[in-house]
Each structure stands twice: as C-alpha cells, then as structure tokens.
Image (tube, rainbow, N blue to C red):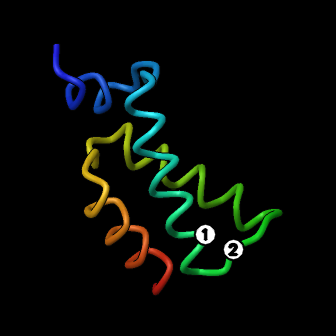
Amino acid sequence: MTRDYLAANNAPLQNEDILICKRVFDHICATGHITGGEACDELATQIIYFYQHGVTNEDSLEQLLAMVAGK
C-alpha cells in the first residue's frame, strides 16, 4: 500500500508523514507568526485532517490551509 492510500484511509501516520506535517506546521507558524495556544492547536488539527484525507504534498497542504484561513 502506498502512503497516499494509507493517509486517505485514516491509517496511523508514519514517521515520514509526521515529518511532512511538522514541516508544514513549522513553516506556517514561522510565516504567520503563530506562537501558541488555540491557533496552533487548530492549525495542527487541520494539517492532520487534510493530510489524512489525501493532501500529502507539502505545498498543496500550505495552499489549502491558506485558502481555509482566508475564508
């Protein structure tokens, strides 16, 4: 099975998946000046949700999160 298939089926995240999510999280926090609290919790939740639903590319994740934030 591929990582994309597992991610889309809510399988547990593997080390590589977590590293991708963390890089996206760190980059958004650094560029968006998010430092903690509820905003960080919400961001982490959104990253994992979208990743598990098939958005496994870092750039695509960041673009999707930017669109969601700009509602």
Circle 2: residue type: Ile
Name the residue rendered at 52%, 55% in the picture: 46
Callout 1: SS: helix
On the image, numbered disc 1 is attached to which residue?
29
Q: Looking at the image, which residue sits at the far top?
A: 1
Name the residue rendered at 60%, 52% in the picture: 44
Q: Is residue 61 left or right of residue 22?
A: left
Callout 2: SS: loop
Image vertical order of residue 68 relative to residue 22, above or below: below
Image vertical order of residue 62 relative to residue 13, above or below: below
Name the residue rendered at 69%, 74% in the picture: 34
Lower sequence index among marks 2 and 1: 1
Name the residue rendered at 28%, 49% in the picture: 55
Determine contact: label 2, label 1, CB under 8 Å: yes
Circle 1: residue type: Cys
Q: Is residue 19 left or right of residue 56?
A: right
Q: Position of residue 1 (x, y in %)?
A: 16, 13
On the image, numbered disc 2 is attached to which residue?
34
Q: Position of residue 4 (x, y in %)?
A: 21, 31
Q: Looking at the image, which residue sits at the far bottom?
A: 70
User: Hey, which quadrant is residue 11 in on the image?
Assistant: top left
Badge 2: residue crowd in 10 Å (few <14, some 14–19, many ≥20)? some
Q: Looking at the image, which residue sits at the far left?
A: 1
Image vertical order of residue 4 relative to residue 38, above or below: above
User: Hey, which quadrant is residue 67 in on the image?
Assistant: bottom left
Along the line of sight, which residue is nearer the eye, 12 or 21? 21
Q: Is residue 37 left or right of residue 10?
A: right
Q: Position of residue 52 (x, y in %)?
A: 38, 37
**Disc 2 to disc 1, C-alpha distance:** 5 Å
Labelled disc at residue 49: none
